[in-house]
Image: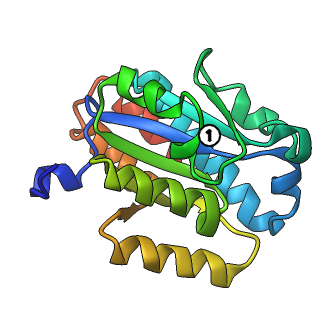
Amino acid sequence: MSSSLTEKLCHVQQSQLLVIDIQERLASAMPAEVLEKVVANTQVLLTAANELDIPVVHSEQYPKGLGNTLAAIAEHFPEGSSVTKTSFSCSDAEDFNDLLVKKKRQQIIISGMESHVCVLQTALQLQQKGYAVFVVEDAICSRKKFNHKNAIKRLQQSGVVVTNVESVLFEWLRDATHPKFKTLSKLIK
């Protein structure tokens, strides 16, 4: 992909949403206030993706040990969008890359946990494969603030676009005359 300005904005026709490992036992290790924000912001992204027909893929890291995806998140997932993995990067999980390729979309919008492990490794590998990668900073987290900040810094230094929920939402909509504008703008008020 070239790095033109238009490719630094999320496009509804080119985006796929990837939700990484928002699972019960992992979530319980997060600071409560941070977890609440990540869950709420991921729900906004999922609702918008569903309203705008944006494909969604989600992963679970070793569910036998880390539990299932939080119910508040899982209820938004379409069937056939799940990848179970033991690798930290989704890109190394069986069937993951095929699932992305089938969607024929070059922008991957990422939310999930943990910022400095699975999110970071996945984002960097997807970027190496030629995808335009957008990590939604207010929809990812780590157990420790330092690790989260370090991951953001590394992602930015690597050329991954670090963004936020509101930016993604309004980039997908592009115009206040969009038929879904009123419905989706209510999600962030």
| Image point (88%, 51%), residue name | 25
Front one among 36 and 29 = 29
x%, y% of residue 62? Answer: 80, 42
Residue appearing at x 45%, y 23% in the figure: 51
- The number of callouts visible is 1
Is residue 189 visible to us here? no
Disc 1 residue type? Answer: Gln
Tell me the residue at 33%/55% (across/down).
128
Secondary structure under the numbered disc 1 in the rendered image = helix
Q: Is residue 61 left or right of residue 90?
A: right
* Residue 48 is at least partly visible in this image: yes
Q: Nearer the viewer, residue 171 or 59?
A: 59
Q: Position of residue 4 (x, y in %)?
A: 9, 56
Q: Position of residue 177 (x, y in %)?
A: 22, 31
Residue 21 falls left or right of residue 96: right
Which residue occupies 83% across, 39% down?
Answer: 63
Residue 70 located left or right of residue 119: right
Where residue 104 sits: x, y (%)? 30, 25
Which quarter of the picture shows residue 167? bottom left
Task: Categorize mark 1 by other alpha carbons within 10 Å: few (<14), some (14-19), many (20+).
Answer: some
Residue at the far top: name it: 79
Mark 1 lies on residue: 43
